Image (cartoon, helix red, strand yellow):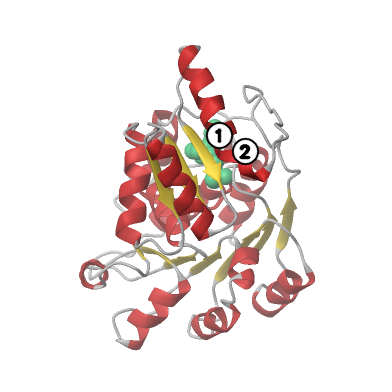
Amino acid sequence: MLFTDLGLSESILRAISEEGYTSPTPIQEKSIPAVLKGGDLLAAAQTGTGKTAGFTLPILQRLSTTAKAGGKRQLRVLILTPTRELAAQVQESVVTYGKYTGLKSTVIFGGVGANPQIKAIAAGLDILVATPGRLLDLMSQNCVSLANIEILVLDEADRMLDMGFLPDLQRIIDLIPAQRQTLLFSATFSPEIKKLAQSYLRTPVTVEVARQNAAADTVKQVVHMVAASDKQRAIVKVLEARTLAGLSRQCIIFTNSRLGCAKLSRALERDGIKAGAIHGDKSQGERTLTLDAFKSGAIEALVAT
Ligand code: AMP
């Protein structure tokens, strides 16, 4: 199947083709037609399956074909995500795929100043991507109205529940018109997710895609058995071996605690490896700077919880 078979408009197809994508992923093949039909959707899909475009593309299509003429823009789509990073990523997709549609969007999340976000909302928007906490915060200041929302997306709903956002979600959803389209994405269909879906979705179409191969074919997986006290040295050795082989040392290292994360990052720095740490004690500004430095190559080892 090709993207051109899905009934998407010229402006959206152009943006997709500029990204270099020709064929929809399995989740996109199933979710795009379902969302275009206007009904609710319950989708089991993990990150990496292309789920973001799976809801972004048909939403852009629905908004641009039913554009409200004249007057100030009204907020018609709300996309809720569990984390700031995911919110920023989803917003990037909305901007990328929607660049020829003339639709306006913004992203709001905590940890950064609210004023630029308030200004962007006041200027008029079609689509808002938000984390629940900051959204409620701005709603309580009467900066956001959900009275005209037509489509609600709960992205990574299982993680939102894991993070204790259920009461926040309930408060938010209660203020959205009942006459709406609701799309729920979750990696799992746990009993809690089923209950959430029963409360807020109406006769949803259910789509499920098998988890794609966890690692790309180009990834070689290796296990090194080392004593805890040797772990740092082992990492340094692996990275040094890559330098000797003329390979890039860029890597992501996951740790299980904030303290361990900070310690490992400092230890790598002492060994001459440009490292940066990302964990919950870092401000959003610091996290963004570190991610950008990793993307630009200024940081070789990104150490993260
Ligand atoms: P997601 O699961 O939404 O986080 O997307 C995973 C990655 O797949 C992102 O980097 C997308 O840019 C990419 N992607 C999304 N749709 C396609 C497609 N149809 N073909 C190739 N890559 C895609």
Residue 65 in the image: x percent, y percent?
A: 42, 54
Residue 25 in the image: x percent, y percent?
A: 62, 37
* Residue 40, visible in the rendered structure: no
Q: Amino acid at mark 1?
A: Arg
Report the front residue among 268 and 214: 268
Give me the C-alpha separation between circle 2 and circle 1: 5 Å
Quick check: marks 2 and 1 in contact, CB under 8 Å? yes
Q: Secondary structure at mark 1?
A: helix
Residue visible at 39% across and 29% down in the picture: 18
User: Residue extending furthest front?
Assistant: 229
| Residue count near mark 1 (Cα–Cα under 10 Å), binned few <14, some 14–19, many ≥20 | some
Indicate the quadrant where residue 16 lies: top left
Report the front residue among 128 and 211: 211
Report the front residue among 191 and 95: 191
Above or below, 69 against 30 in this view is below
Report the front residue among 170 and 134: 134
Tally of numbered discs? 2
Above or below, 157 against 164 in this view is above
Determine which residue is flagged by label 2. 230
| Residue count near mark 2 (Cα–Cα under 10 Å), binned few <14, some 14–19, many ≥20 | few
Q: Amino acid at mark 2?
A: Asp
Q: Is residue 76 left or right of residue 58?
A: left
